[in-house]
Amino acid sequence: MVASTENRKEHLKKLKKRIEKFSTPDEIAGYEKLILEILDLKEQKNAIILGHNYMTPEVFYGISDITGDSLGLAKKAAETDADIILFDGVHFMAETAKILNPEKKVLIADLEAGCSLAESITGKDVRSLKEKHPNIPIVTYINCTADVKAESDIICTSANAVKIVKEIDSDTVIMIPDEYLAGNVQKATGKKLITWPGKCMVHELYTEEDVELARKNYPGITIIAHPECHPDVTALVEFTGSTSLMGKYIEENKPKRVMLLTECSMSDNLMSDFPETEFISTCQTCPHMKKITLEKVLYSLKNEKYEIDVPEDIRIRAKKALDRMFEFN
Ligand code: 13P
Ligand code: SF4
């Protein structure tokens, strides 16, 4: 939980230590001013801020009450008793929070914060897939719209996709919309997966050559990939997992040097937790995640914009698919 009124000074001091590597003193002073205003408003309005692991450090550490990967944040969103949920992440994440909390006001600071995977498929596409492959369970990655969730049997995230596909009672599974995640799950489960040609515009940029080059330039390096990377890339790394599992791996294995094949802010955020580990930058940026800034969050909370809405018939069906996922955990 972020800084109550009494310990804000301490909070800002800790934040400064975490971000001074990336920020000038003027920038830090600007962030502090915005953060204090946001924290005040948050208290006044009984709001909670959920921050995805890809938020920049000043958003991640400065104002988030709860941080995590898609699975962790969806679980927390289902538990909160705040009146307002402000989601610092992308649209499908805020929409998931709304599906789970229809009575609460769910806000996102920029409605344009989308996702290339969510944009790759529509509910109509899923209906066509169902017609083409009747009676095959549809496991859908959480990076999709409410409409797509509503057409799915069960939702998964990068943290539980393998477990869900392994345990589902069918040798063939439709897994959409991330072709590379499906490729990685296929390798791990041995099941037949029917997939969809969606890709993450960030993770698809990593290549086998990036891994080979890093090994050559940084002997002894540990390389960790997100499962949205191509299966030929994940085949070459020490560990593949969700954004939160990346942090867990570093905590448990304490590598001397690490490279994360994922969005830039992930390393920036983990770096201050693991000062003994050297983080080698790869830096691919998600333009959607980077739309969320402190200025926009302040505007959002002040004006209670931009509100996420999901039509009730779609919400009920989408929630069913999400609830099935929660039953697996
Ligand atoms: P995680 O669920 O692993 O945090 O992934 C979300 C995402 O958008 C990765 O690109
Ligand atoms: Fe979507 Fe990729 Fe950005 Fe994650 S990193 S929000 S999957 S575009």
Image (spheres, grey):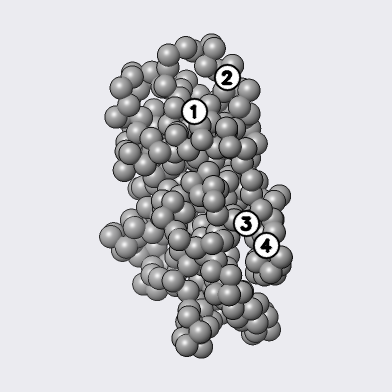
Q: Number of callouts in the render?
A: 4
Picture residue at 67% right of the left edge, 59% below the top: 109
Q: Who comes first in sequence, dot 4 or dot 2?
A: 2
Q: Quarter-wise, where is residue 201 in the image?
A: top right
- Furthest residue to the front? 103
Assign the N terminus to one quadrant of the image: bottom left
Determine crowd level at label 4: few under 14, some 14-19, many 20+ residues with C-alpha closer than 10 A.
Answer: some
Q: How far apart are marks 2 and 3 (CA)?
A: 29 Å
Q: Type of residue at label 4?
A: Glu
Q: Nearer the viewer, mark 1 or mark 4?
A: 4
Q: Type of residue at label 2?
A: Arg
Q: Who comes first in sequence, dot 4 or dot 3?
A: 3
Q: Give how far across and how far down residue 102 sits, in percent.
A: 54, 47
Which mark, residue 127? 2
Above or below, 160 against 124 in this view is below
Mark 3 lies on a secondary structure that is: strand
Q: Who comes first in sequence, dot 3 or dot 1?
A: 3
Mark 3 CB in 8 Å range of ligand 2?
no
Picture residue at 38% right of the left edge, 70% below the top: 274
Q: Distance between the residues labelled 4 and 2?
A: 35 Å
Q: Who comes first in sequence, dot 1 or dot 4?
A: 1
The residue beneath circle 4 is 304
Determine crowd level at label 2: few under 14, some 14-19, many 20+ residues with C-alpha closer than 10 A.
Answer: some
Q: Do the residues labelled 4 and 2 touch (CB within 8 Å)?
A: no
The residue beneath circle 3 is 107
The residue beneath circle 1 is 152
Determine crowd level at label 1: few under 14, some 14-19, many 20+ residues with C-alpha closer than 10 A.
Answer: many
